[in-house]
Image (tube, rainbow, N blue to C red):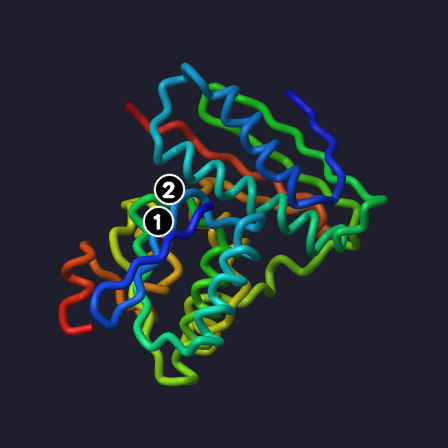
Amino acid sequence: MTVKERIVGEVLILDLAGDIDINTSPDLRKCFDKLIKEQKKKVLLNLSQVGYIDSSGLATLVEMLQRMKRFGGALRLSNLSDKVRGLFEITKLEKLFAIFTSESEALTGF
Amino acid sequence: MMELIISSCNKQVKTVSSKILEVLNGKGVDETFLFDLRLACEEALINAVKHGNKSDPQKTVTVRYEIIPEGVTISIIDQGEGFDYESVPDPRTVKNLLRAGGRGLFLIRKLMDKVEFNDSGNQITMTKLFPKK
């Protein structure tokens, strides 16, 4: 899995690519640790290149959301594939996360 | 029936799921079927390694898989003490939604057509049926 950072206005966008699973989640958590330390207030995860996510990947995202909320930060997700989106629906995590179809939609009003 | 024995290591999880998916090449199954099968298989393997064998390198996980006319059956057996598979909480409740963990077995049950355990809970057998044409 790779993570590339971009900044659009006040929003830090992370372009994630590859699988988010038991073996790659620790790397993603390290990346999130850095953002929490820097107290990034607005973070958008672009998941367009993520084709697979397992329960440890979902757990890592839930953890990140919780940690960001603690200092008043906001996390949004965009461009989920149908299968990945389906997992958010099955697990009801769609209720917890702000999920957008496109990046422009996610940036609107962020 | 094919059998694989792996050590209690997360790195082996993808190797096993890849081998199983490889056997399905040319069987005409779609991406959704492969995604669901891979996820259920990897979740069950992670449970076996992490919760069953407590990541003990001395313990192994046995995987048996078979392509049957109706679909694919996978059994995963760890060397742990098992668990009470009927008392696993629903991760979708308000109380559990914010919890980081606890979604693995739930996903397996949702994505596979049939899921069974042995009495002690250290063996899971799951079947995914081929979509009807």
Circle 2 marks a residue in which chain?
A: A
> Which percent across, then down, holds residue B98?
45, 74
Q: Residue at x 30, y 61 (%)?
A: A13
Task: Label 1: state its secondary structure.
Answer: helix
Same chain for the residues at labels 1 and 2, yes or no? yes
* Foreground of the two, B74 or A66: A66
Q: Earlier in the sequence, mark 1 or mark 2?
A: 2
Farthest residue in the top direction?
A: B26
Residue B101 appears left or right of B81: left
Q: Are marks 1 and 2 in contact (CB under 8 Å)?
A: yes
> Compared to B49, does B86 lie above or below?
below
Circle 1 marks a residue in which chain?
A: A
* Foreground of the two, B86 or A92: A92
> Which percent across, then down, holds residue B114?
50, 41
Residue assigned mark 2: A51
> Compared to B129, does B102 lie above or below?
below
Q: How many numbered discs?
A: 2
* Quarter the N terminus of chain B occupies: top right
> Which percent across, then down, holds residue A54?
48, 50
* Amino acid at pointer 1: Val
